[in-house]
Amino acid sequence: MWTALVVVIASVVVTAVACLLLGRSRAHEQADDRDADSRGFLGAVISGLFIVALAFYVVIVWEENGTAEDNAAREAAAVADACWQTGVLPQPQRDHVRQLLTSYPKLVADDEWPRLAAGGSDPGTASALTSLHAEILALPSAPDSVKSARERILERLREITDLRRQRLDQADGLDNTGRLMLFGTIAGAVGMIVFPLLIGFSGRTRHVLQMCVTAAVLAFVCVVCVGMQQPFRGALRVEPDSFTKVADELAGIP
């Protein structure tokens, strides 16, 4: 929040100073009216490029967040399904497997999820998943009911492992296309402020105010975009609600 405020205020101050220093006089502006059409066209092109890059970036971020939320729901559902399959397992393996399955969503929600914002992972969560694999592989292959449950749980564990890997990959941030669109958004925003100053801008008060407001809006948009580079931080961040709910569900399994 404070970073965004500092960036917006700094952008406004720099823009205002630049307008006052580089702003042309009214007489100069009137003498140069014959170029107004070409300047307006170039300004519209820069604005259009900014809007297109911003639109693509928002779509990419929206899809990434949607994928992360869907994957989290699928991962939590796989944990619940695996836990329901443990009813036929022999003791003491059943209690060990259930304990690990019950602790996994809590570890994800409480320990690993906060680290995702910084692109990290939780070693404890990885260790719990490894222990689960070891416990299931150590189960006997007879009778048939235990063998069938063992195979189903292994399928769910493979799904959990794959979805967790995708979650950690998403925590690393956007792919090259997303980074390109972010760069285009920031470059377009800078161009919308720099272009009028380079080609000649009136230093009248209303024009300076207009440029300052525009700079503030563009700076805020860029800060928000930078903060949404991955789905686990920023204004649209995905929360671990799926794991929190499934943890409560598993606590009620007899």
Image (cartoon, rainbow, N blue to C red):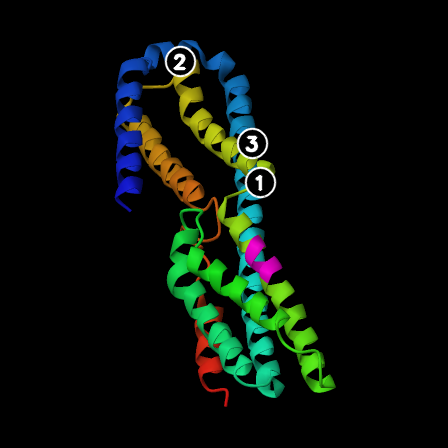
Separation of residues labelled 2 and 3 (CA atoms): 29 Å
Which marked residue is nearer to the observer: mark 3 or mark 1?
1
Amino acid carrying mark 1 in the image: Asp
Circle 3 sits on which residue? 49
Amino acid carrying mark 2 in the image: Gln
Local SS, label 1: loop
User: Which mark is first along the chain, 3 or 2?
Assistant: 2
Instruction: Give the extent of the magenta segment.
Output: 161-165
Circle 1 sits on which residue? 175
- Where residue 145 sits: x, y (%)? 70, 86
- Depth order, front residue of 102/244: 102
Which dot marks residue 30? 2
Classify 99 as above or below 122: below
Classify 56 as above or below 27: below
Amino acid carrying mark 3 in the image: Leu
Q: Is residue 214 magenta?
A: no
Separation of residues labelled 1 and 2 (CA atoms): 48 Å
- Where residue 204 sits: x, y (%)? 29, 22
